[in-house]
Image (cartoon, helix red, strand yellow):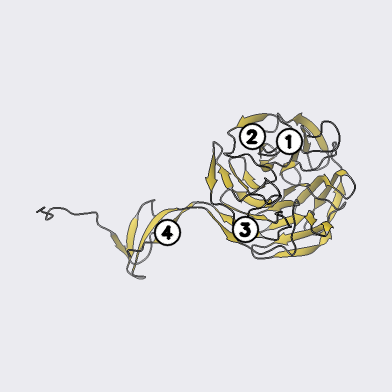
């Protein structure tokens, strides 16, 4: 028979309140709550948010998880010009509208300082641009190239509009236009013309990923430094018409093609590689995203065989204090 007399484990810290600065893997017993606790990584997850007032797809979105904005898009009744805001709990249709009415537009900025540009109107594609101050969408100088379904990133006064498509030739645009708060200037071309892509970042540190160059979805990723596009690691799966948000080094892409029902997959980018994450609860395509980085954001709306009003909120992986159960 083995002799266990000299064997002993590590002591568990006994405290009356949780440590203020624990380290990953640390365990303690809280005598106030009578609970065994630890500090560990919790996987990222999606949770239900407040529904849009109606099913919508292919709008323009900006902002954060608790202060987002949706402009235009398409409902089952047709194209929309309404602007809707989200406060972290519910969506509200506000008095302002976009003009012309359109879907597949570019959008950058915040809930109270946004820029809307290009898109697809009732009869034609657009180059129109509006500046939003939280109350009114004011017409400003148009883009140089008419297009829809383009990528956009930046702020209200320093934005990039890239790629997209129009009925002309070539149908998939490569032109990149830069906005300085007053006018658009064509500054360079994308390495790969495409539409329906994910986008994130700022005017001088942007990211474009996935999309459709014409023959179907791709997984290609490119970064932008204000003058040059550079190839980056591809997503693990090709997709287009996905919901996206974040920064050049902390981005998220979720859902997207294949149509008509879409998919539910989620991937995050850390500036070096893409990693698969928890899937959306509702698979869909042509959804829209808003968020500060890959740790906190939302996606809303989208298309299956019908327009969706679903909002899902993302909380990324994070170290946190957890109760440890022993049974």
Which quadrant: the C terminus? bottom left
Q: Nearer the viewer, mark 2 or mark 4?
A: 2
Q: CA distance from mark 3 to mark 2?
A: 25 Å
Q: Which residue is mark 3?
A: 312
Give how far apart the Cα atoms at labels 2 and 1 are: 10 Å
State if disc 3 and disc 4 touch (CB < 8 Å): no
Q: Which residue is mark 1?
A: 194
* Gap between marks 1 and 4 measured at Cα: 44 Å
Residue neighbourhood size for the residue with mark 4, other residues' Cα within 10 Å, grouped as few (<14), some (14–19), many (≥20): many
Name which residue lies at 75% across and 63% down.
54
Instruction: For label 1, count other residues whose C-alpha is less than 10 Å away and answer few (under 14), some (14-19) or many (20+).
Output: many
SS at badge 4: strand
Q: Nearer the viewer, mark 1 or mark 4?
A: 1
Quadrant in the rendering for residue 49: bottom right
Residue 50 pos. (x, y %): 66, 64
The residue tagged 4 is: 321
Q: Secondary structure at mark 2?
A: loop
Query: How would you rate the neighbour count of disc 2 (Cα within 10 Å): few for under 14, some for 14-19, many for 20 or more?
Result: many
For residue 88, above or below residue 132: below
- In the rendered structure, which disc, 1 or 3, sits on the residue that comes first in sequence? 1
- Do labels 1 and 4 touch, CB within 8 Å? no
Q: Earlier in the sequence, mark 2 or mark 4?
A: 2
Q: Tell me the number on the disc at residue 220.
A: 2
């Amino acid at each position: 028979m083995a002799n266990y007399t000299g064997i002993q484990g590590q002591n568990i810290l006994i405290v009356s309140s949780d440590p203020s600065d624990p380290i990953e893997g640390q365990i303690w017993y809280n005598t106030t709550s009578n609970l065994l606790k630890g500090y560990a990584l919790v996987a990222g997850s999606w949770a239900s948010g407040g529904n849009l007032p109606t099913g919508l797809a292919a709008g323009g979105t900006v902002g954060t998880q608790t202060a987002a904005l949706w402009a235009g898009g398409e409902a089952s009744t047709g194209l929309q010009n309404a602007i809707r805001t989200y406060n972290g709990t519910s969506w509200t249709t506000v008095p302002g509208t976009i003009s012309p009415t359109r879907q597949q537009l570019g959008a950058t900025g915040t809930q109270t300082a946004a820029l809307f540009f290009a898109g697809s109107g009732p009869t034609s594609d657009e180059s129109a641009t509006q500046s939003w101050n939280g109350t009114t969408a004011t017409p400003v100088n148009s883009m140089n190239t008419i297009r829809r379904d383009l990528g956009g990133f930046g702020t209200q006064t320093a934005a990039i509009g890239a790629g997209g498509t129009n009925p002309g030739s070539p149908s998939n645009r490569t032109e990149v236009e830069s906005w300085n708060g007053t006018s658009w200037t064509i500054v360079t071309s994308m390495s790969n013309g495409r539409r329906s892509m994910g986008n994130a970042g700022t005017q001088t540190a942007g990211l474009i990923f996935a999309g459709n160059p014409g023959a179907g979805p791709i997984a290609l990723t490119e970064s932008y430094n204000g003058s040059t596009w550079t190839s980056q690691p591809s997503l693990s799966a090709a997709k287009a018409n996905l919901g996206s948000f974040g920064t050049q080094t902390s981005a998220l892409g979720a859902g997207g093609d294949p149509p008509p029902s879409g998919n539910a997959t989620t991937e995050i980018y850390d500036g070096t590689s893409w990693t698969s994450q928890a899937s959306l609860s509702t698979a869909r395509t042509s959804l829209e995203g808003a968020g500060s980085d890959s740790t906190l954001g939302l996606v809303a709306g989208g298309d299956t065989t019908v327009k969706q009003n679903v909002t899902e909120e993302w909380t990324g992986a994070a170290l946190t204090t957890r109760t440890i159960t022993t049974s």
